[in-house]
Image (cartoon, rainbow, N blue to C red):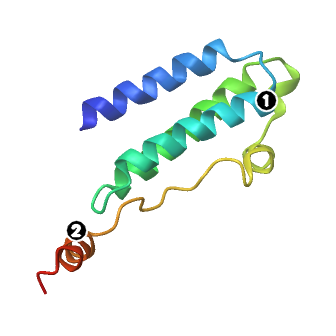
Amino acid sequence: MKKRLKKRISEVKQELKERMHNKVEETVAWLASVIRGYINYHGVPGNMDSARGFHQQCERELYRTLRRRSNKARKLTWEDLRKIIKGKIPKPRLAHPFPDKRFWRQRLEVGAV
């Protein structure tokens, strides 16, 4: 699992380098869709540390990329970045229910109760 996480983060980093001079809104929207997809797939109970780590690494890479855009951008602070991404990048959350809830629902549908 750790290898896949590292590989995905390196892919995001490479794509952010390629999108470095695009509009900030476009880049943030793209990154939000990547994070949303990762969380929807990997947001299972017991894996939230990995999802949070992916979220933090993506924000860190976005910060580094935006700061490399120009000399003026080097003054970008974490507070400025938080203002830019506020409400646009989803927070890590559970996307799938706990197994006992999921299996209980299936038993009800079959009528095994």
Corner quadrant of residue 31: top right
Q: Is residue 93 left or right of residue 66?
A: left
User: Total of numbered circles in the picture?
Assistant: 2
Q: Relative to 93, does residue 53 appear above or below in the rendering? A: above
Disc 2: CA contacts within 10 A as few (<14), some (14-19) or many (>=20): few
Q: Amino acid at mark 1?
A: Val
Q: Which numbered dot is residue 10?
A: none
Name the residue tied to disc 1. Answer: 24
Q: Say which residue label 2 marks.
A: 99
Residue nearest the viewer, comparing 106 with 7:
106
Give percent across and percent down for residue 70: 82, 17
Query: x, y percentage for residue 30?
Result: 64, 31
Q: Residue at x 24, y 74 (%)?
A: 109
Q: Disc 2 on helix, strand or loop?
A: helix
Query: Residue 18's spot in the image, x, y percent?
Result: 63, 12
Quarter assignment of residue 112? bottom left
Q: How far apart, in angstroms, are the residues tagged by discs 2 and 1? A: 39 Å
Q: Quadrant of the C terminus?
A: bottom left
The answer to whether mark 2 and mark 1 are in CB contact below 8 A is: no
Seen at 26% across and 30% down, the residue is 3
At label 1, counting other C-alpha atoms closer than 10 Å, the crowd grade (few under 14, some 14-19, many 20 or more) is: some
Q: Examine the rendered structure and indicate whether residue 30 appears above or below residue 104.
A: above
Give percent across and percent down for residue 99. 22, 68
* Along the line of sight, the residue nearer the viewer: 25 or 77: 25
